[in-house]
Amino acid sequence: MFKIISNKELAPNIFEMVVEHKRLSLKARAGHFVIVMPDESGERIPLTIADFDRQAGTITLVIMAIGTSTMKLVSLKSGSSLYALIGPLGVESEIENYGTVIMAAGGVGTAPVFPIARELHEKGNRVISIQGARTKELLFWTDKLAAVSDSHIITTDDGSEGRKGLVTEPLKELLEKEKDKIGCVYMIGPAVMMKFCSQVVIPYGVKSVASLNSIMIDGTGMCGGCRVKVGKETKFTCVDGPEFDASQIDWDILLSRQKMYCNEEKCSLNKYKNTHGTL
Ligand code: FES
Protein backbone atom coordinates (compact mmCIF):
# COMPACT_ATOMS: atom_id res chain seq x y z
CA MET A 1 0.00 0.00 0.00
CA PHE A 2 1.27 3.47 -0.90
CA LYS A 3 0.27 6.37 1.28
CA ILE A 4 -1.35 9.42 -0.29
CA ILE A 5 0.28 12.40 1.42
CA SER A 6 -2.01 14.94 -0.22
CA ASN A 7 -4.68 15.13 -2.89
CA LYS A 8 -5.96 18.52 -3.98
CA GLU A 9 -7.85 19.98 -6.91
CA LEU A 10 -5.61 22.32 -8.93
CA ALA A 11 -8.26 23.31 -11.46
CA PRO A 12 -11.73 21.98 -12.30
CA ASN A 13 -11.34 18.17 -12.55
CA ILE A 14 -7.52 18.35 -12.43
CA PHE A 15 -5.96 16.95 -9.23
CA GLU A 16 -2.46 16.90 -7.78
CA MET A 17 -1.69 13.78 -5.76
CA VAL A 18 1.52 13.39 -3.73
CA VAL A 19 2.32 9.77 -2.90
CA GLU A 20 4.97 8.31 -0.59
CA HIS A 21 7.42 5.98 -2.34
CA LYS A 22 11.07 6.49 -1.42
CA ARG A 23 12.65 4.12 -3.96
CA LEU A 24 10.56 5.47 -6.82
CA SER A 25 11.42 9.06 -5.92
CA LEU A 26 15.13 8.17 -6.05
CA LYS A 27 14.89 6.50 -9.46
CA ALA A 28 12.45 8.85 -11.21
CA ARG A 29 13.69 10.90 -14.16
CA ALA A 30 11.93 13.26 -16.54
CA GLY A 31 9.80 11.32 -19.01
CA HIS A 32 9.08 8.36 -16.73
CA PHE A 33 5.60 7.17 -15.87
CA VAL A 34 4.01 4.87 -13.29
CA ILE A 35 1.01 2.55 -13.27
CA VAL A 36 -1.42 2.97 -10.39
CA MET A 37 -4.43 1.01 -9.22
CA PRO A 38 -6.79 2.80 -6.85
CA ASP A 39 -8.16 -0.50 -5.50
CA GLU A 40 -7.92 -4.23 -6.04
CA SER A 41 -10.61 -4.36 -8.70
CA GLY A 42 -9.58 -1.12 -10.40
CA GLU A 43 -8.09 -0.65 -13.85
CA ARG A 44 -4.36 -0.04 -14.27
CA ILE A 45 -3.86 3.67 -14.93
CA PRO A 46 -0.60 4.92 -16.50
CA LEU A 47 0.36 8.40 -15.27
CA THR A 48 3.44 10.54 -15.86
CA ILE A 49 5.62 11.30 -12.85
CA ALA A 50 5.05 15.06 -12.88
CA ASP A 51 7.41 15.80 -10.00
CA PHE A 52 9.43 14.01 -7.35
CA ASP A 53 11.09 14.95 -4.09
CA ARG A 54 14.00 12.64 -3.35
CA GLN A 55 14.46 14.00 0.19
CA ALA A 56 10.84 13.66 1.19
CA GLY A 57 10.59 10.33 -0.66
CA THR A 58 7.50 11.31 -2.64
CA ILE A 59 6.32 11.49 -6.23
CA THR A 60 3.65 13.82 -7.61
CA LEU A 61 0.97 12.80 -10.08
CA VAL A 62 -1.42 15.13 -11.88
CA ILE A 63 -4.69 13.45 -12.76
CA MET A 64 -7.46 14.66 -15.02
CA ALA A 65 -10.69 13.07 -13.82
CA ILE A 66 -12.45 12.25 -17.07
CA GLY A 67 -13.34 8.56 -16.82
CA THR A 68 -14.45 5.98 -14.27
CA SER A 69 -10.95 4.97 -13.14
CA THR A 70 -9.57 8.50 -12.83
CA MET A 71 -12.70 9.58 -10.92
CA LYS A 72 -12.18 6.66 -8.54
CA LEU A 73 -8.54 7.65 -8.14
CA VAL A 74 -9.12 11.34 -7.35
CA SER A 75 -11.82 10.47 -4.84
CA LEU A 76 -9.15 8.91 -2.57
CA LYS A 77 -8.48 11.15 0.42
CA SER A 78 -5.15 12.32 1.85
CA GLY A 79 -3.95 9.74 4.38
CA SER A 80 -5.48 6.81 2.50
CA SER A 81 -3.46 4.51 0.22
CA LEU A 82 -3.17 3.38 -3.38
CA TYR A 83 -3.59 -0.35 -3.85
CA ALA A 84 -0.71 -0.56 -6.37
CA LEU A 85 2.00 1.72 -7.71
CA ILE A 86 4.60 0.43 -10.17
CA GLY A 87 7.47 2.28 -11.83
CA PRO A 88 9.41 4.09 -13.00
CA LEU A 89 8.43 2.94 -16.51
CA GLY A 90 9.10 4.19 -20.02
CA VAL A 91 12.18 5.64 -21.67
CA GLU A 92 13.45 8.76 -19.92
CA SER A 93 13.72 12.06 -21.79
CA GLU A 94 16.94 12.82 -23.68
CA ILE A 95 18.33 15.74 -21.78
CA GLU A 96 20.91 17.30 -24.07
CA ASN A 97 22.52 20.66 -24.62
CA TYR A 98 20.31 22.15 -27.28
CA GLY A 99 21.04 25.83 -26.59
CA THR A 100 17.48 27.07 -26.68
CA VAL A 101 14.51 24.75 -26.18
CA ILE A 102 10.83 25.57 -26.55
CA MET A 103 8.43 23.65 -24.31
CA ALA A 104 4.86 23.81 -25.65
CA ALA A 105 2.36 22.61 -23.02
CA GLY A 106 -1.35 22.26 -23.70
CA GLY A 107 -3.88 21.77 -20.88
CA VAL A 108 -2.90 18.99 -18.51
CA GLY A 109 0.29 18.54 -20.61
CA THR A 110 1.84 21.14 -18.29
CA ALA A 111 2.41 18.33 -15.77
CA PRO A 112 4.69 16.13 -17.92
CA VAL A 113 6.36 19.23 -19.40
CA PHE A 114 7.48 20.46 -15.97
CA PRO A 115 10.14 17.81 -15.05
CA ILE A 116 11.58 17.86 -18.59
CA ALA A 117 11.81 21.67 -18.56
CA ARG A 118 13.46 21.53 -15.13
CA GLU A 119 16.13 19.04 -16.25
CA LEU A 120 16.81 20.92 -19.49
CA HIS A 121 17.13 24.15 -17.51
CA GLU A 122 19.49 22.54 -14.99
CA LYS A 123 21.58 21.29 -17.91
CA GLY A 124 22.13 24.91 -18.97
CA ASN A 125 19.61 25.20 -21.79
CA ARG A 126 17.68 28.41 -22.30
CA VAL A 127 14.11 27.24 -21.79
CA ILE A 128 11.17 29.10 -23.31
CA SER A 129 7.86 27.64 -22.17
CA ILE A 130 4.51 28.28 -23.80
CA GLN A 131 1.65 27.17 -21.56
CA GLY A 132 -1.81 27.06 -23.11
CA ALA A 133 -5.29 26.35 -21.76
CA ARG A 134 -8.86 26.90 -22.88
CA THR A 135 -9.47 29.42 -20.13
CA LYS A 136 -7.80 30.94 -17.04
CA GLU A 137 -9.46 28.52 -14.56
CA LEU A 138 -7.81 25.55 -16.26
CA LEU A 139 -4.26 26.88 -15.85
CA PHE A 140 -2.17 25.31 -13.07
CA TRP A 141 1.51 25.21 -12.05
CA THR A 142 2.15 28.51 -13.85
CA ASP A 143 4.62 29.69 -11.17
CA LYS A 144 6.28 26.29 -11.04
CA LEU A 145 6.83 26.17 -14.79
CA ALA A 146 7.94 29.82 -14.90
CA ALA A 147 10.55 29.06 -12.21
CA VAL A 148 12.33 26.55 -14.49
CA SER A 149 11.97 28.67 -17.64
CA ASP A 150 13.97 31.64 -18.88
CA SER A 151 10.81 32.95 -20.39
CA HIS A 152 7.24 31.85 -19.89
CA ILE A 153 4.33 32.67 -22.20
CA ILE A 154 0.70 31.96 -21.32
CA THR A 155 -2.04 31.60 -23.91
CA THR A 156 -5.76 31.03 -23.38
CA ASP A 157 -8.31 30.35 -26.11
CA ASP A 158 -10.67 32.99 -24.69
CA GLY A 159 -8.02 35.57 -23.70
CA SER A 160 -8.94 35.38 -19.99
CA GLU A 161 -5.20 35.13 -19.11
CA GLY A 162 -2.06 35.89 -21.12
CA ARG A 163 -2.31 36.04 -24.90
CA LYS A 164 -5.59 35.22 -26.58
CA GLY A 165 -5.12 32.30 -28.96
CA LEU A 166 -3.36 28.95 -29.28
CA VAL A 167 0.17 27.87 -28.35
CA THR A 168 0.95 27.50 -32.05
CA GLU A 169 0.95 31.28 -32.53
CA PRO A 170 3.85 32.26 -30.20
CA LEU A 171 5.57 29.02 -31.29
CA LYS A 172 5.57 30.16 -34.92
CA GLU A 173 6.72 33.67 -34.00
CA LEU A 174 9.63 32.31 -31.96
CA LEU A 175 10.70 29.97 -34.75
CA GLU A 176 10.50 32.82 -37.24
CA LYS A 177 12.63 35.09 -35.02
CA GLU A 178 15.13 32.63 -33.55
CA LYS A 179 15.16 29.58 -35.82
CA ASP A 180 18.95 29.25 -35.73
CA LYS A 181 19.16 29.34 -31.95
CA ILE A 182 16.38 26.81 -31.24
CA GLY A 183 17.73 23.27 -30.90
CA CYS A 184 14.54 21.44 -29.98
CA VAL A 185 10.81 21.93 -29.53
CA TYR A 186 8.93 19.74 -27.05
CA MET A 187 5.14 19.48 -27.33
CA ILE A 188 2.89 17.78 -24.80
CA GLY A 189 -0.87 18.09 -24.61
CA PRO A 190 -3.97 16.94 -26.47
CA ALA A 191 -3.11 14.99 -29.64
CA VAL A 192 -4.68 17.61 -31.88
CA MET A 193 -2.58 20.36 -30.28
CA MET A 194 0.59 18.30 -30.79
CA LYS A 195 -0.34 17.61 -34.41
CA PHE A 196 -0.64 21.33 -35.17
CA CYS A 197 2.51 22.22 -33.21
CA SER A 198 4.37 19.60 -35.22
CA GLN A 199 3.06 21.07 -38.48
CA VAL A 200 4.31 24.50 -37.40
CA VAL A 201 7.82 23.20 -36.64
CA ILE A 202 8.41 20.98 -39.71
CA PRO A 203 9.12 23.79 -42.24
CA TYR A 204 11.86 25.17 -39.95
CA GLY A 205 13.72 21.84 -39.80
CA VAL A 206 14.08 22.01 -36.00
CA LYS A 207 14.09 18.78 -33.95
CA SER A 208 10.69 18.20 -32.38
CA VAL A 209 9.61 15.76 -29.68
CA ALA A 210 6.06 14.81 -28.72
CA SER A 211 5.18 12.87 -25.59
CA LEU A 212 2.24 10.55 -26.13
CA ASN A 213 1.62 9.50 -22.54
CA SER A 214 -2.04 10.48 -22.80
CA ILE A 215 -2.81 7.71 -25.33
CA MET A 216 -1.70 4.83 -23.10
CA ILE A 217 -4.39 2.51 -21.75
CA ASP A 218 -2.89 -0.17 -19.47
CA GLY A 219 0.81 0.62 -19.88
CA THR A 220 1.83 -3.04 -20.13
CA GLY A 221 2.76 -3.45 -23.80
CA MET A 222 -0.06 -5.96 -24.22
CA CYS A 223 -3.34 -4.17 -24.97
CA GLY A 224 -1.99 -2.51 -28.13
CA GLY A 225 -4.05 0.62 -27.50
CA CYS A 226 -0.98 2.86 -27.56
CA ARG A 227 0.24 1.75 -31.02
CA VAL A 228 1.54 4.63 -33.08
CA LYS A 229 3.07 4.86 -36.53
CA VAL A 230 6.41 6.66 -36.40
CA GLY A 231 7.95 6.92 -39.86
CA LYS A 232 7.65 3.43 -41.36
CA GLU A 233 7.59 1.66 -38.01
CA THR A 234 4.84 0.78 -35.55
CA LYS A 235 5.79 1.66 -32.01
CA PHE A 236 4.19 1.08 -28.63
CA THR A 237 4.08 4.25 -26.57
CA CYS A 238 4.35 2.44 -23.22
CA VAL A 239 7.37 0.37 -24.25
CA ASP A 240 9.22 2.43 -26.89
CA GLY A 241 8.13 5.88 -25.68
CA PRO A 242 6.41 7.91 -24.47
CA GLU A 243 8.55 10.39 -26.49
CA PHE A 244 8.87 10.25 -30.27
CA ASP A 245 10.08 12.43 -33.13
CA ALA A 246 6.93 14.54 -33.64
CA SER A 247 7.63 15.10 -37.32
CA GLN A 248 7.49 11.33 -37.97
CA ILE A 249 4.24 10.56 -36.14
CA ASP A 250 1.18 9.72 -38.22
CA TRP A 251 -1.18 12.04 -36.34
CA ASP A 252 -4.27 11.19 -38.38
CA ILE A 253 -4.15 7.46 -37.50
CA LEU A 254 -3.47 8.37 -33.88
CA LEU A 255 -6.41 10.77 -33.71
CA SER A 256 -8.83 8.28 -35.27
CA ARG A 257 -7.68 5.53 -32.86
CA GLN A 258 -8.37 7.77 -29.88
CA LYS A 259 -12.08 7.66 -30.69
CA MET A 260 -12.20 3.85 -30.69
CA TYR A 261 -13.36 3.28 -27.10
CA CYS A 262 -15.51 6.42 -26.74
CA ASN A 263 -18.79 4.53 -26.37
CA GLU A 264 -17.47 2.01 -23.85
CA GLU A 265 -15.90 4.85 -21.84
CA LYS A 266 -19.17 6.80 -21.85
CA CYS A 267 -21.20 3.75 -20.70
CA SER A 268 -18.75 2.98 -17.90
CA LEU A 269 -18.70 6.61 -16.73
CA ASN A 270 -22.51 6.84 -16.68
CA LYS A 271 -22.66 3.65 -14.63
CA TYR A 272 -20.10 5.04 -12.16
CA LYS A 273 -21.91 8.39 -11.86
CA ASN A 274 -25.24 6.64 -11.25
CA THR A 275 -23.72 4.72 -8.35
CA HIS A 276 -21.30 7.27 -6.89
CA GLY A 277 -22.53 10.66 -8.14
CA THR A 278 -20.24 13.29 -9.71
CA LEU A 279 -17.13 14.80 -8.11
S1 FES B 1 -0.82 0.97 -23.21
FE1 FES B 1 -1.40 -1.04 -23.65
S2 FES B 1 0.14 -1.75 -24.96
FE2 FES B 1 0.79 0.24 -24.43
Image: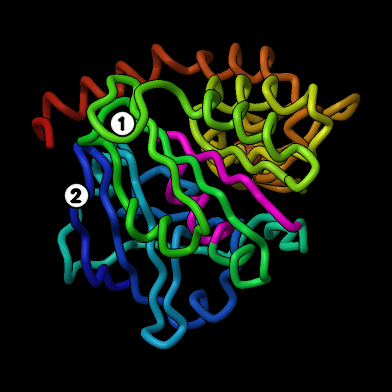
Residue 66 located left or right of residue 218: left
Q: Is residue 234 magenta?
A: no
Span colored in magenta: 99-117
- First-in-chain label (1 vs 2): 2
Residue flagged by tag 2: what amino acid is it? Glu
- The disc label shown at residue 9, or none: 2
Q: Residue furthest front?
A: 177
Assign a secondary structure to mark 2. strand
Residue 43 located left or right of residue 211: left
Assign a secondary structure to mark 1. loop
The residue to which callout 1 is attached is 66
Q: Quadrant of residue 201?
A: top right
Is 245 rendered above or below residue 46? above
- Residue 106 image point, x, y percent: 45, 34
Colouring rule applied to residues: rainbow
Few, some or many residues within 10 Å of mark 1 (<14, 14–19, 20+): few
Q: Is residue 1 visible?
A: no
- Residue 181 image point, x, y percent: 76, 47
Residue 127 located left or right of residue 206: left
